[in-house]
Image (cartoon, helix red, strand yellow):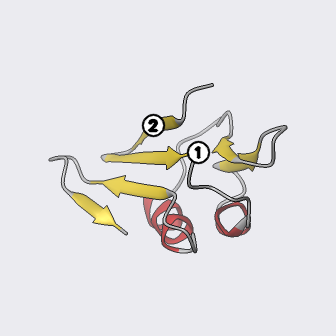
Amino acid sequence: MSDVEERQIGELTVRIDRLLCVGFGDCIEEAPATFEFDDEGIATFQEMAEEPDESTVMEACRACPVDALTVFDEEGAQIVP
């Protein structure tokens, strides 16, 4: 698995930096349908049946205490953290 995972969620691009993630799980608490732990205890994206709510995903990314989650808008500008 790559050190960085990205997924398009609506008009947002969400990036997980797996080297920064230490497994606090705040993102999973905020958006359990979007994020989960892998076998190593590092955040990864869930297989999603439907598109998650963008505001919920942004709150989950803001909750990361080590800024392992980054959100970019449709123009590529970083908006979280």
Q: Earlier in the sequence, mark 1 or mark 2?
A: 2
Quarter in which the C terminus is drawn:
bottom left
Give, as a three-letter code, the residue at label 1: Arg
Instruction: Give the structural element (helix, strand or loop) at label 1.
Output: loop
Q: CA distance from mark 1 to mark 2?
A: 11 Å
Give residue 55's position: percent from left, percent from top: 45, 66
* Residue at x 68%, y 33% (from the top left corner): 47
Give residue 62's position: percent from left, percent from top: 48, 72
* Residue at x 25%, y 53% (from the top left corner): 73
Taking depth in this image into account, of 54 and 36 the one nearest to the observer is 36
Vertical position of residue 20 compared to residue 24: above or below: above
Q: Identify the residue position indicated by label 1 in the image.
A: 18
Q: Which mark is residue 6?
A: 2
Seen as rendered, the residue at the extreme left is 75
Q: Residues within 10 Å of mark 2 (few under 14, many from 20)?
A: some
Give, as a three-letter code, the residue at label 2: Glu
So how many labels did they put on this image? 2
Instruction: Give the structural element (helix, strand or loop) at label 2.
Output: strand
* Residue at x 19%, y 47% (from the top left corner): 76
Please tell me in which quadrant of the rendered image residue 44 appears: top right
Q: Are marks 1 and 2 in contact (CB under 8 Å)?
A: no
